[in-house]
Every structure is written in structure tokens, then in C-alpha cells.
Amino acid sequence: MASNLVSSRFTVSGPTARSDEQPPSAVATATDGDPRPVASIERGAEVGRYTVLRRLGAGGMGAVYSAYDAELDRRVALKLVTADADSVSVTKGAASLMREGRALAKLRHPNLVGVYDVGWHGPDLFVAMEQIDGVSMRRWQREQRPVADVLSHYLQAGRGLQAAHEAGIVHGDFKPDNVMVEEGGRVVVLDFGLATRLTETTDETRGMGTPAYMAPEQHLAESLTPASDQFAFCVALYEGLTGRRPFPQTTAASLAQAVLDEAWTAPGREMPAWVWRQVQRGLAVDPRARHDDMAALLRALDPQIRRRNFLVGGIVGLGALVTTGAVLTGGRGDPCEGPDPLSRAWDDSRKASLDARYDDAAAWTRVRGRIDHFSEQWHDAWTDACRATHVDRVQSQTLLDRRVACLDDDRVRMTALLDALDRGNTSVLSHAIEMELLQRPPHACGSSNLERAAPLPTDPEERARYDTLMNVAARAQTMGELRELKDALSLLEAHPLRTEDHPAAIRAVEAARGGTLYYLDRYADAHAAYDAALRAADAAGDETAFVWLAGDYAVVLATGSNQIELARAWFQQSENRAQRVELTVTQRMTLLQRDATISRREGRYADSITAINEALELASEDGDPIILGRLYNNLGLAHLNRQALTEATDAFKRALALRHEGLGPEHINVGQTLYHLGRTHIESGQLDAAEHDLQRAVDLFVNLEGAKRERAEALEGLAIVAAERGDFDTAIRRMRAVMDSAEGWASPTRFAGYAENLAQMLFLAQRFDEAALLLQNNLRTLERVHGSSSPKLWGTLHVHATVELERGNLREALQLEERAAAVAVDETEIAQAQLAGIFADAAIRCTSTEVPQNARTLAAKPELPEAFRNELAEMFPTWAENIAKHCPALAPSGG
């Protein structure tokens, strides 16, 4: 018989990695400390992970360099304190730079420069930020520009200031030199060198700034407030429209006096009178007399809002004379009543057609009810957005466009689902009922969530392309969730992206691509897509999208690539950003489920269980059996991982009952829970119960289209049951059938998992040479796909070592176990490989048959699950017998 000293547990793969359930943050927090002067930086020098390319410019306290970030393949701007400044200036400059980095690291907005990193270069402080390719606003406005263009550019800059203020940060030195204009028209505010939290004005920042743009309170060395930035903005806008400043005095004293006396110079005809009225208010000496905030000033300066208000005022006035109730419609009544765009897709004809198609499908009643509910909520959101602009007149047309574009994403996804149901079958229906779209209300597309979003394209051709890409992304995402994976990928590949595409469109397309590639087991490609989507979400100023993308990516990293530390870092980013957005109960549950999934993969099973129980408390408020069933299924997985088999069995049985209720008895997820229950019975030695549940799962999957993977894994479970009974011929025959069925759809990694289990069965049948050949081929495949140090090699290395040990190739077995221990990330896997290595080393030395102390210490490690520690300890009684088998000259001395 084969040695039972080295554990050769079967790798039970299965649908556990799916969500039944960028590298770490690029923004680092610099340590506190005394700032010190920076040395001169030469081309090619390394600053952190950045390579300096050239000097871009310098100011009184700082120098800026262009640099290359090889890790993320991008150019950045590096800002440092200059080396030749006097000590006082250097201290203030570094402190200012630290404030700037910390302030901007908290902000994400298309009209604010993005900060990637803050740190020390030796004794010197640096901020790595987005490198803006363009010209300063001062240079841009030297050419004579139309009033509309100047106003449009300053409105963008104002939105950047508004975002900073909403984050509790004052710029303190706003002026045309600190605003950049890119070739494509994007306006970016930078140089937050005096930026400070609203509650943290210091002696260093009080009274500082550029005199020509300083508010009265700055001239008086009083605290900075958002109203101070508003004053500076109005000075700069006046200058942009007229070519001169409202206070033309040239000495510091005369300038300060003119500002305090409100002795501005009237702008004349260069500035429209309605603009001057708003600017004049922003130049008031008393901050309380200025506009309420930047948002109020920007609304007053927005030509579109002014034009609509004028139009509406005229029509309402006319209506008082001619008719009543006609607003913007020429007598047609409320323009926001009547059918919305989604109701045209979910009309009576479509309902009747789908009712007929799925008349005998139990799940259709549930799906139809959820579509109805979603459509009603979507109609309310669409009507609210429409009325805010066309009836209540409290919202600009620009903001309406954004809200409709936001709602359109869900509309297109729902339409794609309806189209798929039209052409589909019960397989599509079974996936539809679990779709994320039907588990939540429509996306929150209120104005407060969209004000920071990048402006939508105004050019007709660009807008048409934007709309096409958003439509493609929404359709592909739906197709992916319905497991129409190849069709989804083909659709995306038919619409390649361009670098100049709108960031929101890039985000949507790459997110859909990432999810599709993940389900196709193409993990490296999925990572690249998620990385691109996250960058685009940041560029688009879409905080909510970033939260969910970062969370999705974290789960992909944890379950697909086993990159656990990276997964935790990305989840932390998602959780941090989630503090800035308003979350629904469903979204809070989603975050908890993601946390639970990653914790489980980290081996922190107690934390995973805690997170799931918190989610269960939230879910119990609504009592949705679909959501509760998913949560109990995940709870069972966490208990199974920690070998708490009674608790796992109870959780899976509860999940099974809930999924029967919510999904119907023939749903694919019912089969998945049966599969997990069968796995649990195998672990607890209840082989008859295991065979019963696994066979039920196989029977269910056989009748479902699109369940090849699930069917193969349930058959694999039945093969393991046969192997555990000692019926190795049946086990091997079943495993070969699994591998035959996997040809053509299984990824190399998944196929290798099946081969690994077949090799273990050959090993147990003492067909060692066959097992060794299979494992050698397996190892070459995995190394080619994942590299030689991937955690995915652990199983094949460990089983291969077990086979070589039995073949008498002790040194090769030891080398394989050392490699296995080096690539393993799970504590139990590391312990298995290390213990096997200790045995192989003892067998090579042939000096003793006693169990070494380091083996006993390893098996008693408290961080290992108790059941696993017991399993390791059970190997010790046969230690002497197996050592003697490899070293016949030694007489066994007991264990």
C-alpha cells in the first residue's frame, strides 16, 4: 500500500470561487517629521519608484520634475522642495508640500490634479502626481477668446474648487497660473501648496497667497475659508474676460487697501452685465455677503441655467395671460408624464411573449415580479430627473443629461436581459433570477452623486460614440452575467477603445471585459481590464463606480489568482472610498460578503463568519430567500474551510431550503449547494450521504444548459467518494470521464486540478509511474501558464512529491516539497509541505526512525485548524514503519 504518512487529500474544486459571495493604493501617507531641504535631482535619478526625466519648472519653495513610473507604465510630475532655499523657507515649503499631498490624496475629481504618492526620498519630501499636458490658464487666455469659452473653462475650474471645498479643503492660492488647460479642453486645478483642512488653518498658511488674488481676510492675516477661494476665483475670472484685474494697484499696501475698500474698477463691455453682477458679489469684503458657496456661484454663472430660467419665466408669465398648466410644452401638459424609455422595452407585447415562452417555468413568476418592480422604480427615478429640470426648474440641463446617462446604463442592461430572455431558454432564466440588476433598486442617479463626474461629450460625433460604447458595455455586462461569455467578448472586441474615448465609457467597457474574462478563467487578462477600468473611473470622477470596481477586483484577485494580499489592499480601497458615498442596505451587504470571501481566502475563517453574520442581520430585515440563501451558502463554506463540519452541514441545509424557496428546485444554485453539502459529507466520512447529495447535483446539472463545469465538478465529487471507499478502479474511471468532458471548455488551471486528483487516485491504486508521468506534464503546463512560483503549483508539487517518495526518489521528493512550501499561501498547505519535507529529509539521512521534534512542533501549531492538527498527528504512529521502508538497515524504534 502507498504510504499514509504524507497527506494526499483530494483538491475538491467546484463553484466556490464565484461571487456567491490596482495594486495597493497609489496614495501613501507620509510619516510625520521635520521637513528637510531637497537636493538637486538629475536626469535618471530614482525618487521612490520613479525615474526622473527632466525638470519642468520651479517656484519660490518647490521644483517640479517629469518622471516615469515603471511599475504602472506612466509619466508623473514630481514636486519637491528646492535645495537652495533658506532654512525657514524650506521648512515652510516642505510643510506646505506635505499639506498639498495629503490634501489632494483625499480628492478624486476630473478638474483636480490627481495625486498618486507622497513620500520621502532620503531626507527629502516629494509628491508624485498626475502630469498634465497643456498650458496654464494664464497662457491660454492671452489669446482673445470668446466670452462663452472663457466662462466654460472657469466653470470647470470652479467645479474643481467646489469638490475640494466639499472635501473640507481650501486651496488658498487660486490664480490662472495654478490652472492648466489640456488640449482636449479639460481644465485642471493644481498647486494646492497652501491647501489646508477647514479646521486646521495654521500660522504658516494664515496671510499667505498671491497678493493680486488674495481675499480681504488674507490681507488681514485671518483664517482661510472657502469664501477666500471664491474671491480669488472672481478676480481670476474678471481677468480672464477683460485682460486686466479688478484691483490694478501695483504695491502691496495700495492693493490691500483697495481690496478692503471694495475699490474695484468696473469691467465695461468686455464682461456681460449678468456675469459682472455675480463676480461683484464674489468680491465683497464681508465673506458672508459673497455667494453661499462655490456651487451657488457656479449655478449663477452657468449660461444654460440662466437661459432656461429666462425662458421658463417668459412662458409662465405668458401662461398667466393665456392658459394655465402649460410649462415648456406649448399646452401639452407635464412633459415628464407618459411612457419612459424603459417602458417601451417592457411593454404589454413583450410581457405576453415572455409569459408564453416561460409558462411552465417556476422561476419566471419570480423574475417577472422583479422586472416589474425594477421598472417601476426606474420610472420614478427618470420622472424625478426630468421634473427637476423641466418642471421644478431646480436643475441644469447639463445635470439632467448626466442623470439620464446614469439611468441609461440600467435601462440598457434591462433591455439586454429582456432580449436574452426573448431568444433564450431556462438556462438564461436561471441565471437571470440571480442577476445583480434584479437584486437592487436602479442606480442612485441623484444630482449629488453626479456633480463631480466628468462632463459628457458635447461634440455630436463624440457623444454618439460615447453612447454606443456605454450601450455595448451594458449589453456585454448583462450577457456575461447570463454566461453568454463568448458572445459578450465578441461584442466588446468588435468595439475597440481609443485613448481619447470618454473615461466613463472606458470604465464601463473595461469593467464588462474584466468580468467576462474572469468567468472565462483568463485571470491575467481580467486583471489588466480591471486596472484600466479603475483608472478610468478615477479619471471620470465616478466615486461610486470605483468603490464597486475595486471590490470586484479584490474578489477576482482572491478567488481567481489567489493574490490574497493584493486582494485585501484593493478591498481596503473599496471600503475607504465607500465612506464617501451613500450606501443602500444591499450595497452594505455586498461589502460584507466581499470582506467575508477575502477573509476566507486569507484563512481568517472567524472573521469571514463574523462578516457573513453581519450581512445576515441586514438581510433578515427584508427576508429575501435568494439573498439569505446565498449568505447561508457562504457561511457553510467558511465553516467547511475551518473544518467545523456540523456547523457547515447546518448552514448548507438552511441554504438549500432557502434556495428551493427563492429559486425553485431546478436552479443551478440549488445544485451548487447540494455539491457543497456532498463535499462536507466527504470530509465527515459520511460517504453514503455524500454520494446521495452529489448524485442529486449531477442529475440537476445534466438537465441545465450551460452547466458543464458544475456537472464535471459534481462527477469529480462522486469519483472522490469511490476513492475514499477504496474502489480505485471506479474512481479512476470517473475521473477520466470528467477530464474527457472538460476538453474544450476547461482552462489549463482547471484541467490541471482534475489531472491532480486523477494522479492521487492512481497513486492510491499504486500505479505510481502513471501518476508521476501525469504530474510531470501537469507541472509543465502550470509553469507555462502561471510561472514557476505561482501558488497554483502547490497541489501538483505536493502530490508529485508524494508519488516520488513512494517511488523511492527521496531527494526529488524533498526538492518538490520545498518548492511546494515556498509557493503555498495557506497555513495548512505550508504545514503539509513542511511536514512531508521533514519526513523526506529524515528518510534521506537514515539516522533514526523517531519522530523529530520539529515535526511534532509543526503539527501542534495553534494557528492551524484543530481537525487538521489531529490529522497531521495521526501520521506519527506510522513514521517508524515508513522510515524503515526507505532505510531497511534501521530497525523501527516507535513513534
Image: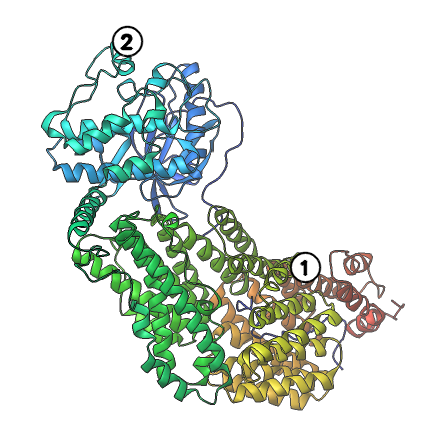
* Pointer 1 residue: 827
Of all residues shown, which one is farthest toward the right? 893
- Numbered mark located on residue 253 in the image: 2
Residue 842 lies in quadrant: bottom right
Badge 2 or badge 1: first in the primary sequence: 2
Please give the name of the residue rendered at 72% of the width and 84% of the height, measured from the top-left corner: 689
Circle 2: residue type? Ala
Q: Residue at x 34, y 46 (%)?
A: 451
- Between 524 and 822, the one lying in front of the other is 524
Mark 2 crowd level (few <14, some 14–19, many ≥20, 10 Å Cα): few
Say whether residue 505 is visible.
no
Residue 770 versus residue 841 in the image, above or below? below
Whole-percent x, y for residue 104 in the image:
41, 36
Which quarter of the figure is the N terminus placed in?
bottom right
In the image, residue 316 lies at what x, y percent? Answer: 20, 49
- Between 637 and 523, the one lying in front of the other is 637
